[in-house]
Image: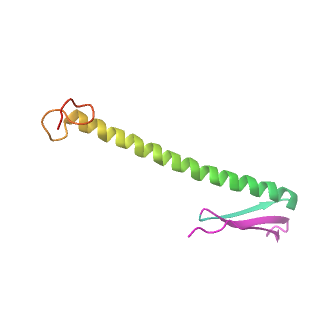
Amino acid sequence: MAQASQFVISKFTNPSGEIVFRVTGWLVGKRIRKNFSSRAVGGPGLFAIITLERLNAFVGLLVGLATLVYLCLRIRDAVRKHGNGRSGRSGPESDDEG
């Protein structure tokens, strides 16, 4: 089941003593934690992080799909080049009736 995208902006003190606003949450099964200088920057920053993470996931899916199509076409071409174990032509472009 998919985990809901819930993010929290909280005040946080770095070990250096600097006070920042930390955005934490989960997105597509990946933990997100990012510090911002102010709460006003944290909101748009969070939106940018979510947008980029979703875009990266989508691009990864497209790359995987393109790779799969490429490999299928290579297999098809190899089968056509070396024959598919039958004598004569067969397939949609064949003139044979059976």
Q: Quadrant of the C terminus?
A: top left
- Quarter of the image holding residue 92? top left
Q: Is 74 displayed left or right of 24 in the figure? A: left
Q: Is residue 90 above or below residue 31?
A: above
Q: What residue occupies the far top of the structure in this picture? A: 95
Which residue is at the front of the view, 35 or 4?
Answer: 4
Q: Is residue 67 above or below residue 41?
A: above
Which portion, as a residue range, is magenta?
Answer: 1-28
Residue drawn at the location 46% of the way across and 43% of the way down: 66
Q: Quadrant of the N terminus?
A: bottom right
Q: What residue occupies the far left of the structure in this picture? A: 87
Residue drawn at the location 65% of the way across and 68% of the way down: 4
Residue 72 colored in magenta in the image: no
Position of residue 40 measured from the top left corner of the image (x, y, whole percent): 87, 58
Residue 14 colored in magenta in the image: yes
Q: Is residue 4 something one can see in this rendering?
A: yes
Q: How is the image coloured?
A: rainbow
- Quarter of the image holding residue 81? top left
Q: What residue occupies the far front of the structure in this picture? A: 97
Residue drawn at the location 70% of the way across and 67% of the way down: 25
Q: Is 67 displayed left or right of 39 in the figure? A: left
Position of residue 14 measured from the top left corner of the image (x, y, whole percent): 80, 68
- Quarter of the image holding residue 45? bottom right
Q: Is 56 displayed left or right of 20 in the figure? A: left
Residue drawn at the location 47% of the way across and 48% of the way down: 64
Q: Is residue 38 something one can see in this rendering?
A: no
